[in-house]
Image (spheres, grey):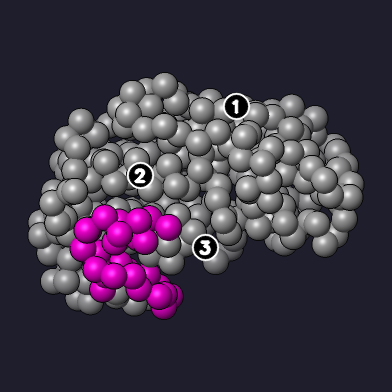
Amino acid sequence: MLKCYNVAVVGASGFIAKNLRRYLSDNNIKLISISRNDFKTFNNESKIISKHYDEKNILQKIKNSDALIHLVGIGKQSVKTDFEMVNVQFTNHVVNLTKKAKIKKIIYLSGLGVSPNTSSGYFISKYKAEKIIIDSGLDYTIFRPSYVVGKDDLFTKYLKKQIKNTQILIPGSGKYTIQPIHIDDVVQVILRSISDRKFNHKIIDLVGPDLVTFEKYVKLFFKGTKINIKKIRLEDAYHDAIINPKSDFGIDDLNILIGNFKGNHEKLSKMTKLKFQSIIKLLQSGRLS
């Protein structure tokens, strides 16, 4: 059993955050969780609702926590909310809060595919956020997750929604690979990063053991159903993403999908000494559909 750590969670109402908060609470972590929107709390947890994450509402309550977990970010932008505003400027705000609260460690979820050589707007914003954290002088662990899947994740909810439409569209060939990781594994890894010093000052790929093509993932997910799987030209998918704000795939969603980004699962496995779940086996057993 871990000693009783005090941890602040910024961006507490999303899919990863909800599962992480429940797991940390169950493992004797005291939480101060912050969100713009109201949310249900778990044991060992207090909440702060702050639309603009104002320092005066937050600072004293999170002071001297053992770590801060930064989960705020967007993957699709609009004229009202863009990558620079949320992924970069808000990260700068969170880092300043962390330092003023005398919290020594920050844990951040970036994205698989982030690098200094990228030309993608989403990846550029995540790279800038990483740099702000690295240059802050704080202890840090930066995770670069692939698709995080489990009950009620956005990707799975999207696929389930297509069952009602009886058809799902696959952009392009569908032969590009993804490396999904189950949420239950993600929360265990993050818990270890709070207490284990070997995670300090590290950038770590947060990926599962299986590389699977998008086409195979979709076919396994819908195995046993009557849904029609149809491929569409990438040109058409990108055109819809550009002109239709309600498109199933945004421009950066498509960039990530067809990017064939591969993470170092072996390194993650050696660091954590965890037995990771095979997403392919979960799909074959129907436990993700």
| Residue 223 as seen in the image, left or right of residue 116 | right
Q: Earlier in the sequence, mark 1 or mark 3?
A: 3
| Cα gap from disc 1 to disc 3, whole angstroms | 32 Å
**8 or 85, which lies in front?**
8
Residue range corresponding to the magenta coloring? 19-46
**Which mark is drawn over residue 211?**
1
Q: Nearer the viewer, mark 1 or mark 3?
A: 1
Query: Label 1 crowding class (10 Å Cα cut-off): few <14, some 14-19, many 20+?
Result: many
Q: Residue 65 location in percent, x, y?
A: 15, 59
Q: Name the residue that disc number 3 marks.
A: 81
Q: Name the residue that disc number 2 marks.
A: 188
| Cα gap from disc 2 to disc 1, whole angstroms | 21 Å
Residue drawn at (80%, 57%), measured in percent from left and top? Answer: 163
Q: Amino acid at mark 1?
A: Leu
Q: Earlier in the sequence, mark 3 or mark 2?
A: 3
Q: Amino acid at mark 2?
A: Gln
